[in-house]
Structure formats: structure tokens, C-alpha cells
Amino acid sequence: APTFGAVSLTADVSGILPVANGGNGLGVAYTVATLPAAGTQGRRSWVTDALAPVFLAAPVGGGAVVCPVFDNGIAWVVA
């Protein structure tokens, strides 16, 4: 029977390709309006147009602040 080399990939549901798997570990940048629908708890990303972001509050677009966001399973919140 043929044998094949092992492939090791890190399981990650955050939408971020880990550095170990050839990604940059950073995820994808969005504007607040283009964030995908929330509901997958644990996803992380960042927005490029936040207006006065407040930790754990829903991000508001229309500004110029780049900040991380987190999908808590219900909504995207500033991380």
C-alpha cells in the first residue's frame, strides 16, 4: 500500500490562517459596514473606519480609527 507524507494543519475557526500554515496570522480587514454577519463565536478581525471605538461595544463606522473586533456569537464588538 502506498504511504503518504503527513500534513499538519492547525484547526482554526476564527477565519485567520495561522503563521504555521502559511498565513500572516492577522485575518482580514473590513469596514464596519462590510463585516460579515455575526454568529460564529471566536472570530477576530479588524475594522478600518471605527468612530470613537469603546471596548466591548458594537463598532460604529464613519471614522478613521483602525481597531480589532471580535465576534461574540451575537454581534461584532470592539476588542
Image (cartoon, grey):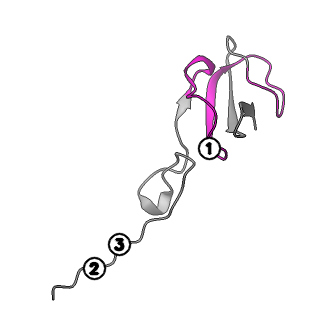
SS label for mark 2 = loop
Label 1 vs label 2: CA separation? 31 Å
Q: Is residue 20 above or below residue 30?
A: below
Looking at the image, residue 15 sits to the left or right of residue 54; the answer is left
Q: Quadrant of the N terminus?
A: bottom left
SS label for mark 1 = loop
Looking at the image, residue 16 sits to the left or right of residue 74; the answer is left
Stretch of the chain drawn in magenta? 30-59
CB atoms at circles 3 and 2 under 8 Å apart?
Answer: yes
The residue shown at (55%, 31%) is 29
- Which disc number belongs to residue 43? 1
**Which of the pair 44/39 is nearer the observer?**
39
CB atoms at circles 3 and 1 under 8 Å apart?
Answer: no
Q: Is residue 62 above or below residue 6?
A: above
Magenta segment, prevailing SS (helix, strand or loop): loop
Q: Toward which corner of the image does residue 35 lie, by quadrant?
A: top right
The residue shown at (76%, 38%) is 79
- Which disc number belongs to residue 7? 3
Residue 4, horizontal then vertical, whole percent = 23, 80
Residue 43, horizontal then vertical, whole percent = 62, 43
> Dot 2, how many residues are within 10 Å of its Cα: few (below 14), some (14-19), or many (20+)?
few
Residue type, mark 3 in image: Val
Residue 45, horizontal then vertical, whole percent = 61, 37
- Which disc number belongs to residue 5? 2
> Dot 1, how many residues are within 10 Å of its Cα: few (below 14), some (14-19), or many (20+)?
some
Looking at the image, residue 79 sits to the left or right of residue 18; the answer is right
Q: Is residue 14 above or below residue 61?
A: below
Residue type, mark 2 in image: Gly
Queried whether the magenta region covers residue 53, the answer comes back as yes
